[in-house]
Image (tube, rainbow, N blue to C red):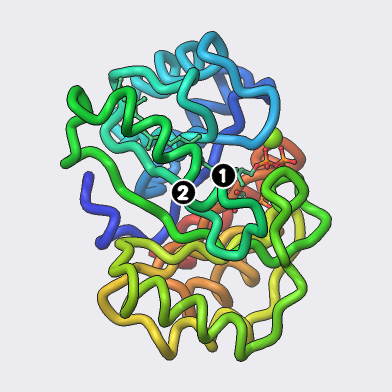
Amino acid sequence: MYDFREWKHAFKLDPNKEITDEALESVCESGTDAIIIGGSDGVTLENVLDLMARVRRYSVPCVLEVSSVETVTPGFDLYFIPTVLNSTDPDWIMGLHHQAVKEYGEIMDWDEIIVEGYCILNPECKAAKLTKANSVLDTDDVRAYAMMAEKMFRLPIFYMEYSGMYGNPRMVETARNYLSSTVLFYGGGIRTAEQAKEMAQIADVIVVGNVVYDDLAMALKTVSPVK
Ligand SMILES: CC(C)=CCC/C(C)=C/CC/C(C)=C/CC/C(C)=C/CC/C(C)=C/CC/C(C)=C/CC/C(C)=C/COP(=O)(O)OP(=O)(O)O
Ligand SMILES: O=P(O)(O)OC[C@@H](O)CO
Ligand SMILES: [Mg+2]
């Protein structure tokens, strides 16, 4: 199912982390809607190619979440391009994207490219530090970013990113109330079936990352309650 608008659950795998063949098989065959490959540090063309080839043994849709131009390679079903709406550095909002499109725009297949409006809410996460995000936000800020994503920029995805920390469902609900055509992704700190269920009742798609590496059995239990 390549239409992310129909998804409920995705696993995010980090090319910079080790995963055994056995664990990868259970993740890919778990019933999740997609595997997103991405991370904010230590991502290389080599480790992206390796993980893509391993995920490609299974029929689950496989998406590259681009964090640098150098690590983009053909072979994915879709390419998610983050733009960090609450970054204070224009490079992470539009600058790197401008350079990439200037160089590769003519050869890009635009049907495979989906822009994600990121709103990073955990000030301690790597992505917040990398992109110099202003992550101390209240519900009015989140409401405004959600409205900007949908009404102003007409982005396909609004991604509330709490990477490494379980977020505040009230904040996610605030965004929910202002999104209809833009798909709401929630990611961060989901470690139990209950948390998965709670966030899936608010967001359109929940993304489960680190727990795959910390407690695979718990990670697998996040799928069925939301599907
Ligand atoms: C198909 C093909 C060959 C095409 C070629 C054409 C081409 C190069 C297309 C690319 C076009 C394009 C517009 C690219 C954009 C370039 C770019 C660099 C954009 C910036 C993206 C961005 C804002 C990244 C910021 C970091 C970020 C938000 C990453 C998301 C991943 C994330 C938060 C992962 C969480 O894990 P991690 O942070 O690693 O946490 P851990 O501590 O748990 O590891
Ligand atoms: O790794 P966790 O905390 O599950 O977060 C998932 C994802 O949103 C990271 O980009
Ligand atoms: Mg990482």
The residue sitting at the right extreme is 124
- SS of the residue under disc 1: helix
Q: Please indicate whether residue 111 sits to the left or right of residue 128 in the image.
A: left
Reply above or below: 157 against 168.
Answer: above
Q: Position of residue 101 (x, y in %)?
A: 32, 33
Foreground pick, 68 / 95: 95
Query: How far apart are labels 1 and 2 at the CA level?
Result: 6 Å
Residue sitting at x 42%, y 20%: 52
Q: Please indicate whether residue 79 sits to the left or right of residue 47 in the image.
A: left
The quadrant in which the C terminus is found is bottom left
User: Which amino acid, by three-letter code, is at mark 1?
Assistant: Asp
Q: Please indicate whether residue 126 sits to the left or right of residue 220 in the image.
A: right
**Residue wearing tag 1:** 91
Q: Residues within 10 Å of mark 2 (few under 14, many from 20)?
A: some
Foreground pick, 73 / 147: 147
Residue sitting at x 63%, y 58%: 87
- SS of the residue under disc 2: helix
Foreground pick, 22 / 65: 65
Q: Which mark is residue 218?
A: none
Q: Residues within 10 Å of mark 1 (few under 14, many from 20)?
A: some
Reply above or below: 67 against 157.
Answer: above
**Label 2 within 8 A of ligand 1 by Cβ:** no
User: Which amino acid, by three-letter code, is at mark 2?
Assistant: Met
Q: Quadrant of residue 136?
A: bottom right
**Label 1 within 8 A of ligand 1 by Cβ:** yes
Residue sitting at x 49%, y 12%: 50
Q: Is disc 1 in contact with disc 2, using a CB cutoff of under 8 Å?
A: yes
**Residue wearing tag 2:** 94
Q: Is residue 190 visible?
A: no
